[in-house]
Image: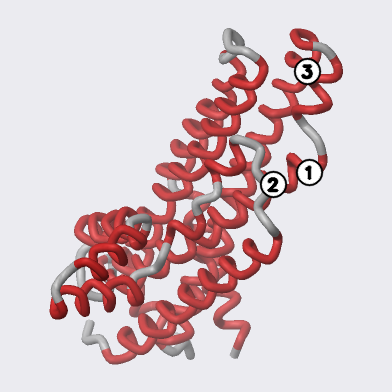
Amino acid sequence: MNNVIAVIAQHTFVEAFRKRIFQVIFIFSILMVLSTQFFTFFTFGEEVKILKDIGMAGITFFSLVISLVIGSSCIQTDIEKKSIYTVFSYPVTRKKYIYGRALGVFCYLIFAIFILSMVFYIALGIKTHFIGQKFGEEARFSFVTFAHNIELTKGILLIIVRCFIIVSSAFLLSMFFQQTFTIIMCFLIYVLGHLTAFIANMASEANRVFGYLMTGFYYIFPNLEFFNVSDYISVGKHVSAPYVLLVSAYGIIYSLMLILVTANIFEKKEM
């Protein structure tokens, strides 16, 4: 039975990999990360900070684009092209179809962000060479250390989990809306998810009814600001491992809950 989910996940991964839009995104992302090598007219500290900012921002942006596009189109495309009926002609339940699709998308996101991260680390390696020539070997070794790479990896891990939430939200919204509106709604979730602290302050200062609404909104919406550690990493601050594990667990559980809700809705959906 679990083989069905694995087969659907594999098909989803290959399907996403072959889409031209993601190839274009990859090319642009690689060019953007490698373009950081041209920032050579700053002081040593500024070069390091700009390289980290641009690299992490590039990974965040392109992973968000991939999440929005693939999450909103994955199921809708099958329904519109009627290919979903071919899938259901085999012994595949609707829930297993959703689970397989979600697993395939999650695996593809991990793969895509891994590739982007490797390009980023290569850019770091190239920059390290030039920093050694420009500022001396001591600066080069202070720029890229094991601890430095670990902090970057923590930030990238949180980017992956945040994308899981966006994709899961897109899966759920695609049960009710077309692709364009799903993308818009997911982008709003992304923006509002980074404003949850502001929403909580509004709830504490508002009247009782509005305060209850804002409080409910605060607890229902995912707090995506938890995953935003790029600013800390770019200035060399330490992000604790327990924090990364706790936030990752929160994001994964939230994503799984959305997928379970989506599967239950899809099981009763008329097509």
How far apart are the two marked residues, 1 and 3, measured between alpha carbons? 18 Å
Residue under circle 1?
A: 147
Count neighbours of disc 1 (C-alpha within 10 A) and say few if under 14, some if 14 to 19, many if 20 or more: few
270 or 156: which is nearer to us? 156
The answer to whether 225 appears left or right of 40 in the picture is: left
Is 229 located above or below residue 71 in the figure?
above
Residue at image mark 2: 151
What's the residue type where badge 2 is placed?
Glu
Q: Can you tell which quarter of the image residue 94 is in?
A: bottom left
> In the picture, which quadrant includes the N terminus?
bottom right
Picture quadrant of residue 142: top right
From this viewpoint, is residue 89 visible?
Answer: no
Which of labels 2 and 3 is toward the front? 2
Q: Which residue is drawn at 43% across and 84% down?
A: 260
Residue at which label 3 appears? 129
Which label lies toward us, 1 or 3?
1
Which percent across, then down, holds residue 58? 49, 37
| Contact? badges 2 and 1 (CB < 8 Å) | yes
Label pair 1/3, CB-CB below 8 angstroms: no
Tell me residue 30's x, y (percent).
55, 31
Seen from the viewer's position, the closer of residues 85 and 20 is 20
Identity of the amino acid at label 1?
A: Ala
Q: Residues within 10 Å of mark 3 (few under 14, many from 20)?
A: few
Local secondary structure at mark 2: helix
